[in-house]
Amino acid sequence: MGQVFNFIGMKALILSILIVFSSLGLWAQGFQGGITGGLVVSQVDGDGYGGYHKIGVQGGFYSRYYFNDKLTLTAMLRYLPKGSRFGDDKVQRYFKINLNYIDIPITVSYRLLDKVDISGGVSVGVLFKAKVEDHTGVVSANRLFYKKTDISALAGVSYHFTEEISVSVEHTYSILPVNTRMSRQHNNLLIASLNYQF
């Protein structure tokens, strides 16, 4: 079963990378590119532990198409850690889920104010590494139960300091459960990014 998930996940990753690079190839036809990076805080709804206690670093690059002065379409390829954390590894109550994804969001943005955009869209995350651990050590039995593909909805807001530099805040939430054995588990993330457009 794990090999099946790996095969499906790899096909999804290859297809998504081809889509993003195809977009970059159309740069001369109205596309512009950029890089992005920042912090992400996450939790897994349904794991029994609430709160955005897991902190990680995310980053990648994007291609953006301008329909007009107000409306844009963005395709991104980024590394995005997800999961949850509860307690401290030095105490008896400790639990951590590490889920590392290659994430491909597709978003539509609208210039609401002079320097402020609002955006929404969907993303496909391909899981390439998973680890669950508690105070007794790695809980390896749960690793195969996390789906290789995570489809999420997202919404965000951006502020542009200049035409090249902007900051953004985004909320991302899994549309479908991420665990095959626990149907109520969904990835829940808040993402803060610094963006530079070439």
Image (spheres, rainbow, N blue to C red):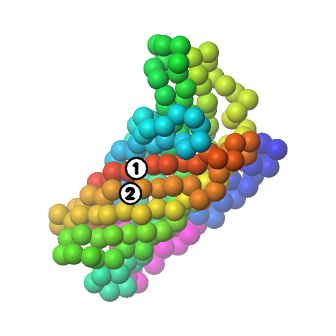
Q: Identify the residue at horizontal 61%, vertical 32% (top origin).
A: 131
Instruction: Please tell me whether residue 30 belongs to the stretch shown in magenta.
Output: yes
**Residue under label 1:** 190
Q: Identify the residue at horizontal 64%, vertical 47% (top origin).
A: 184
Which callout, 2 or 1, points at the residue further toward the start of the chain? 2
**194 or 24, nearer to the observer:** 194
Q: Are marks 2 and 1 in contact (CB under 8 Å)?
A: yes
Q: Identify the residue at horizontal 69%, vertical 59% (top origin).
A: 11
Q: The residue under label 2 is which amino acid type?
A: Glu
Q: Cα distance, mark 2 to mark 1?
A: 6 Å
The residue range painted magenta reads 18-34
In the drawing, does residue 114 fall left or right of residue 44? left
Q: Say if 41 sits above or below 167 in the image.
A: above
Where disc 2 sits, the SS reads strand
Place residue 26 in its image quadrant: bottom left
Farthest residue, direction bottom: 68
Q: Identify the residue at horizontal 30%, vertical 58% (top origin).
A: 168
Q: Say if 126 sits above or below 104 in the image.
A: above
* Dot 1 crowding, Cα within 10 Å, few <14, some 14–19, many 20+: some
Where disc 1 sits, the SS reads strand
Q: Position of residue 15 (x, y in %)?
A: 63, 64
**35 or 193, nearer to the observer:** 193
Q: The residue under label 1 is which amino acid type?
A: Leu
**Residue under label 2:** 170
**77 or 113, nearer to the observer:** 113
